[in-house]
Image (cartoon, grey):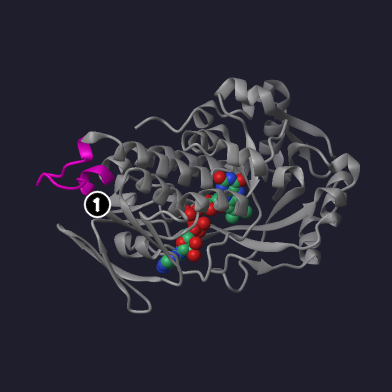
Amino acid sequence: MDDLLVIGGGMAGLSAALVAQRAGLQVTLLEQAEAFSEVGAGIQLGPNAVRVLHDWGLLPALREVAAFPERLAVRDARSGAQLGGLTLGAAMQQRYGQPYATIHRADLHQILLRQLQGSSQVDCRLRQRLQAFEQDADGIRLQTEDGSRYQASALLGCDGLWSRVRGQLLADGAPIFSGDLAYRGLVPMADLPPELRRNQVTAWLAPGLHAVHYPVRAGAAMNVIVVVEGPIPPDPESWDHAAQASQLRRALGSVHGDFDRLLQAVPDWRLWPLNARAPMRGPHEHAQGRVALLGDAAHPTRPYLAQGAAMALEDAWTLGRLLAQPDWRHGAAGQGIAWPGLLQTLARKRWRRNAWIQQRSRRNGQIFHAAGPLRWGRDLGMALLGESLVDLPELYRGPPAP
Ligand SMILES: Cc1cc2nc3c(=O)[nH]c(=O)nc-3n(C[C@H](O)[C@H](O)[C@H](O)COP(=O)(O)OP(=O)(O)OC[C@H]3O[C@@H](n4cnc5c(N)ncnc54)[C@H](O)[C@@H]3O)c2cc1C
């Protein structure tokens, strides 16, 4: 049986382990944390991400814990004016064959983890922090910080933004602070004023800032993200900072009453400095030899298209589709998987779409935060062009078949 090492137990690592397991591989997944858990709050899943989960038979599990908003509404954060929007719900299902979902990260993580637990083919090891690896024509050898050694035929670096696998494979430096700070909070729906308990995604825009909120936990809670421009906090590598509501209030200034009431209801803010990299420049940033990078390790992105986790799911889905093709099943020597060829194909299939999403996400941030003529053009465009300006068929019809 062919064997695979996966570094990292986030969305990318769990998804990659899932498709490898289903392809009959023996998988060892190494996670540095003490326990499998997901920090953070909600994520949006466009029809492209839901299509992946549907293909893996996970739609029933998603339906139990996700929310399926009826509408995306875009409003001016200061005046409250409706700037534009997009009908989600049944319209999205009809147009793309899959719904638009919003979910707590921990719930999606659990759905994926449950597929791996108890499997004799997947060995998930906690407290295993990758130190270094080496590859040659025969395979991979790696060592973790506690001195444990592993070997396998191939290695997937799913170790996120600060990926060590990437550091060794590409040696292209650390991600760069984007200049944006994301404050995230979760409010029990029952604690919100009735007029704010809506099954919709709401985006608030103003120069230099934006906010998004949507239901999670099957509608039992509202996830709130507020992004403001600001200086880098003292510990940029930390994913999770306790944040002061007063700092956020100062950065926001005066906002519309609906938005203000929502902010007041958030019991606890957590602060994420947003880091990113330039869009991918070629397939070499996805895979080299027997090593591939998936998810944020390969293409960390600003969250303004709400597609980071979706890209991780799409990467793993594409890997699963390739593993199912008989072409790769017998290497040149007539045994095992021809990993370098398979991973190169994965890289060639994925990098352009991932680069495009990274680039669009960055551009979206500029549009959301626009002041002056760009802001004026944005608002006029939404008023004149309506839903077509917000809809993203090329994205939501994905992932493209390999
Ligand atoms: C504010 C914000 C909002 C977002 N909203 C959305 C959204 O609406 N929709 C969406 O699709 N995406 C969204 N995203 C993006 C999404 O959260 C990420 O793209 C996604 O979680 C990346 O998953 P990953 O598995 O690649 O990385 P991670 O989730 O970072 O997982 C990496 C894992 O690797 C482990 N690890 C790291 N180093 C090592 C090592 N040396 N050895 C062993 N283990 C290691 C870590 O402990 C971690 O468990 C958002 C992100 C932010 C910041």
Please identify the quadrant where the C terminus is shown: top left
Residue closer to the observer: 339 or 202: 339
| Residue at which label 1 appears | 2
Position of 32 relative to 339 (above/below): below
Residue closer to the observer: 10 or 34: 34
**Residue 382 position by quadrant:** top right
x, y percentage for residue 183? 70, 58
Point 63% across, 27% down: residue: 389
Q: Amino acid at mark 1?
A: Asp
**Residue 136 position by quadrant:** bottom left
x, y percentage for residue 333? 9, 47
Point 49% across, 44% down: residue: 358
Q: Give, as a single range, the part of the protein colored magenta.
A: 327-343
Residue 28 lies within the magenta run: no
Point 44% across, 65% down: residue: 31
x, y percentage for residue 201? 72, 38
Residue closer to the observer: 377 or 350: 350
Is residue 46 among the parts visible in the rendering? yes
Farthest residue toward the bottom?
Answer: 146
Q: Is residue 43 left or right of residue 190?
A: left
